Each structure stands twice: as C-alpha cells, then as structure tokens.
Image (cartoon, coloured by chain):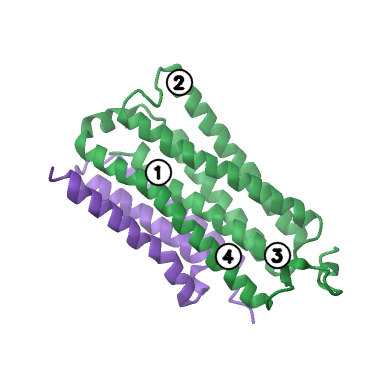
Chain colours: A purple, B green
Amino acid sequence: MKEHDSGTRTYIVVWGALVMLTVVTVAVSYVHLGMMNVFVALLIASAKASLVALFFMHLRYENRLVWGFALAPLFFLVLIVVGTLSDTLFR
Amino acid sequence: MSGQSTHHGPGAAGHEAHMDPATAREAATLGIWTFLATEVLLFGGLFTSYIIYRIKYPQIFYEGHLKLDHVLGAINTVVLIGSSLTVALGIAAIRKGKVGLLRLYLFLTLLLAGTFLGIKYVEYTEKFSHGLYPDTDIFFSLYFMLTGLHGLHVLAGMVLLGGVLFLAGRGRYSESYHTPVEISGLYWHFVDLVWIYLFPLLYLLG
C-alpha cells in the first residue's frame, strides 16, 4: 500500500551527486566561457534541483496530479521572466 | 514508544478522523506543493529583477560578486545539501517506524541549519565591516534581499522541524502516521532548492 521506499543507499548516492555537481559548478566558474558561464551554471543548478525534487522530495513516486501541482509554478515563472524581459529589453 | 497508542480509541487522534488516511495524505501533499508554488513565484519575482539588472549592469554584478566569499558560499551549499540528506533519511526512518532515528536525523538537520545561518552571519558581518550594505549598489541590494529572504526561510524551516522534533519526542508519529514529517521535509528541501540557484547566481559569475 505504500509507495516505494527509496532506500538509504539511494539517498546517499543522490547526496554524493549533489556534492559533486557543487564542486563542478565551482570549478567551471573559474573557466572563462563568457556568456556560456551563466548557462552552464544554470544547467548544473537545474540538474541538482531535479535530483532534489525527484529523490528527496519523492516526486519520482508521486502521481500525475502531484506532478501537475509541482510543475505548474514553473510555467508561471517562465511567463513572468519572458514577459518582463520582452518589455525591458526592447524599451 | 507511545506512538502506537495515539492510533487507538475513538477520537484519540483528531488528525485522522475526517477522511481515510491515504486521502488525507494526498490532500496534504497537494497543499504543500501549492504553497511551494507561491514560494517559487515569490523568489521568481526577485530572480526576474536579478536577470533584468544583470543584463543592464553587467559590470556592477561582476565587481560585486568578487567581494563575496566563494569558499563560505560553497561550504554553505554543502551544509544545506547535507541537511536535505538528513531530512530524507529521517523520513525513511519514520516510514519504518523508527522514531528514535527520526529524532536523531532531525537534530542533525537543525544543527546543519544552524551552521548555515552561523556562516551567513559571519558573511553579513564581513560585508558590513567593509561598508557593503543593501543600499551600496544594485548587486548588493539583490544579494541581501535574496539571501535575507532565503535566510528567513531557513529560520522558518528550523522552527517547523523543531516542532516536528518536539512532537516526535512525544510519540506523535509512527510507521502508519507521519504526514507532518513528510510535509515539513518537502518545505525544507524547497529551501535547499532555492539556495542551489542562489549560490551560482550570486557567488559564481565566472
């Protein structure tokens, strides 16, 4: 009746991956890639965020309704950012 | 120990009287995700201003980030990730009915959260002593606003998890009932998530 119990080992592996990605993001920041630095940093941060959401927040084991509730704010976030930029960038 | 007793006897446990436990748990899960949605948009507004001003004043952002302590920021990132792990392990423990282990992990989480705020305090003091305040420039306005708001969330999470720790000590949670532990855990992981973005955006501009 319970959702799968992601075991202790899974959590520790995820934690290890998060720490590793933190090291990578710090290392990459010392390499000058120009504009690409921001994108690489955001890409790594999003990978970390996905790991936290999927495993620590158990999203992996939740049903579609919960997924909908979890992803909906991202749509609005994109709307806010894109909408605001489309104004401020072309003033 | 007394965890079992709360689930016996009519009306003994007010929190599960109205609907079946699975429905109650799902309602609580949807509730916290809805709250987290408002939190995403709260920080989202600030992130939007970050993007706009960073595009407009790249030089101020570049010079500002050089004045932040990257090492302390990185340590705090690892500290907060560690606290997410202890919360996740605590929830895994109570799912197996191990109240003592849950309390240990919650205590460790509070310790890590305290460490995070302690390091933040050191950083703020350092900035102030160098004459860097929220009104110094747009970078430090956003830095103090974002990290300050995040710090308040850490504090709120500590109060929340402290409450869960207290109630766990009174035998309120068991293998069959631990929804508040999971819900508080979700909030804590969200606070970690926000920092995962704040750290590279403020400390590591490249």
Sequence order check, earlier mark of 3 and 2: 3
Q: Chain of mark 4?
A: A
> Where residue B198 is drawn, which disc sits there?
1
Using the rendered image, report if marks 3 and 2 lie on a common chain: yes
Residue A30 versus residue A8 in the image, above or below = above
The Cα atoms of the two marked residues, 1 and 3, are separated by: 31 Å
Whether label 2 touches label 1, CB < 8 Å: no
Structural crowding at the residue carrying mark 2, measured as other residues with C-alpha within 10 Å and reported as few (<14), some (14–19) or many (≥20): few
Front-most of residues B186 and B200: B186
Q: Quadrant of the C terminus of chain B?
A: top left
Dot 1: chain letter: B
Image coordinates of residue B135 in percent, x first then y, are 37, 24
- List the residue tagged with mark 3: B94
* Residue at 34% in and 56% down: A77
Q: Is residue B134 above or below residue B39?
A: above
Label 1 sits on what residue type?
Leu
Mark 2 — residue?
A: B128
Which residue bears the numbered disc 4? Answer: A9
